[in-house]
Amino acid sequence: MKYVFTIDMDGTLLNDASKLSNKTIDVIKKYKDQHHFILASGRSYLGMIDFYQELGLTTPIISLNGALITYPDGKTSLTYLPKDEVTEIITSLKGIYEAIIFNGLNNVYSINHDNHLEKVFNGAKHPSVIDLTKLKHIPEDIINGVIVTRVHKMRQFEAFFDELTIKPRS
């Protein structure tokens, strides 16, 4: 009988140094022809692909907390954030957020971009970072995002989402 193992990356598949251990690599490579191993993470596709390739997997990659599924044939299944709600977040939370990073299908859109934050959030630095403050229109391909705020502004931040379909997760 063939089983499907869906494995989270950080704190599960990867060790404390965010690396694959030799034992993990050996076990997955040994059993990948007998079972299906699927990587699933809040990381971006770019933050997962190197590990996927190192393991020699041929299964879908579930990234951005399930908002983007990339199949081995290159096809994707994805869910975009509502453009009007992204616009509302950017305009209404001004003064509450410190930085914002949104993942698009092929770009990262950012306000007050921080490379370290992006590495933590995505697991990799994206080659194409676009400053949202320099765009005339909000892009339509935003999939998910991270918004950084100060602790003393959390109540105000969370209350903002009461009327939106998008909900924060801290």
Image: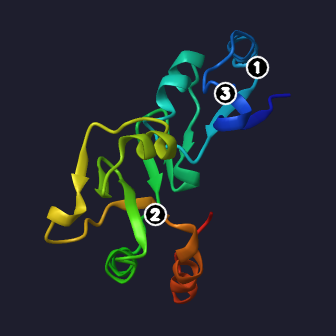
Name the mark nearer the viewer: 2 or 1.
2
The residue carrying pointer 3 sits among few (fewer than 14), some (14 to 19) or many (20 or more) residues within 10 Å by Cα, namely: some
Q: Position of residue 59 (x, y in %)?
A: 59, 32
**Colouring style:** rainbow
The residue carrying pointer 1 sits among few (fewer than 14), some (14 to 19) or many (20 or more) residues within 10 Å by Cα, namely: few
Residue shown at 35% from the left, 51% from the top: 105
Label 1 sits on what residue type? Gln
**Residue 6: quadrant of the picture:** top right
Q: Where is residue 96 in the image (x, y as percent from the top left)?
A: 43, 75
Label 3 sits on what residue type? Leu
Please give the label number shown on residue 14. Answer: 3
Name the mark nearer the viewer: 3 or 1.
3
The number of numbered discs placed on residues in the rendered structure image is 3
Is residue 114 or residue 51 the one in the foreground?
114
Q: What element carries label 2?
A: strand
Tag 2 or tag 3, which sits nearer the N-term? 3
In the rendered structure, the answer to whether residue 8 lies left or right of residue 84 reads right
Residue shown at 48% from the left, 32% from the top: 72
Tag 1 or tag 2, which sits nearer the N-term? 1
Q: How far apart are marks 3 and 1 (CA)?
A: 22 Å
**Residue 152: quadrant of the picture:** bottom right
Please give the label number shown on residue 34. Answer: 1
Q: How far apart are marks 2 and 1 (CA)?
A: 41 Å
The residue at the far bottom in this view is: 163
Tag 1 or tag 3, which sits nearer the N-term? 3
Residue shown at 46% from the left, 63% from the top: 147
The residue at the far right in this view is: 1
Q: Name the residue under label 2.
A: 147
Which quadrant: the C terminus?
bottom right
Residue 65 in view (yes/no): yes
